[in-house]
Image (cartoon, rainbow, N blue to C red):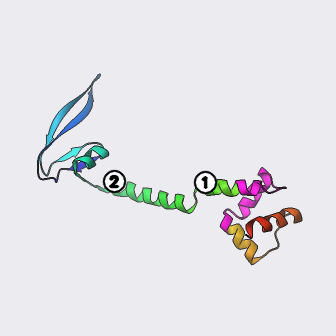
Amino acid sequence: MLFMNNTGKSEKIRKDETIGVRTGHYWKTVKDGQEADIPEHYGMALGFTKVVNDNDKEEQSIDIVDNINKALNPKDDIKAYKDKLMSIKGIGKKTAKDIMKDYPTEADMVKRIKEEPDMPYDDDVAESLKNVFSE
């Protein structure tokens, strides 16, 4: 990652590099205002500031979108919802999968039960769904 030395003083940094078949390190002095390509944790520890270019901005925006998608639809919640469905007597993997197609989240199921109590499933399954998700 690219960092700029804005500390007001020169800093010596250790650079690890592979040259040919030989792996080694060397010391480099980074003066105030100079850029250095170093690992993120090392640059932050030295007090350098990150240099952000257009590619980094794109990657950051993609990361933000991914984080939002994970927050809106986390796999743990989906698994917990599926496990909750399968814990109901009369609902197995196939029925749980069919229910999750119609109501992908637990919130959708609760909303559906509040709006319209008649469910398009067997009476015993529908009654069990109402009992579990109307709480």
Q: Secondary structure at mark 1?
A: helix
| Crowd tier of the residue under label 1, counting other residues whose Cα lies within 10 Å: few below 14, some 14–19, many 20 or above | few
Which one is in front in this view, the residue at disc 1 or the one at disc 2? 1
Out of 78 and 87, give the one closest to the viewer: 87
Q: Amino acid at mark 2?
A: Asn
Give the farthest residue toward the bottom: 115
The magenta stretch spans which residues? 83-107
Look at 26% across and 47% down and name the residue there.
Answer: 45
Look at 84% across and 67% down and name the residue there.
Answer: 127
- The answer to whether marks 1 and 2 mark residues whose Cβ atoms lie closer than 8 Å is no
Where residue 13 appears, x then y in whole percent? 19, 39
Viewport quadrant of the C terminus? bottom right
Look at 74% across and 55% down and name the residue there.
Answer: 97
**Spatial distance from mark 1 to mark 2, Cα to Cα?**
31 Å
**Which label's residue is closer to the chain start, 1 or 2?**
2
Q: Which residue is mark 2?
A: 55
Where residue 1 appears, x then y in whole percent? 29, 46
Q: Which residue is mark 1?
A: 76
Q: Secondary structure at mark 2?
A: helix
Where residue 126 appears, x then y in whole percent? 83, 66
Give the farthest residue toward the top: 21
Q: Is residue 14 above or below residue 117?
A: above
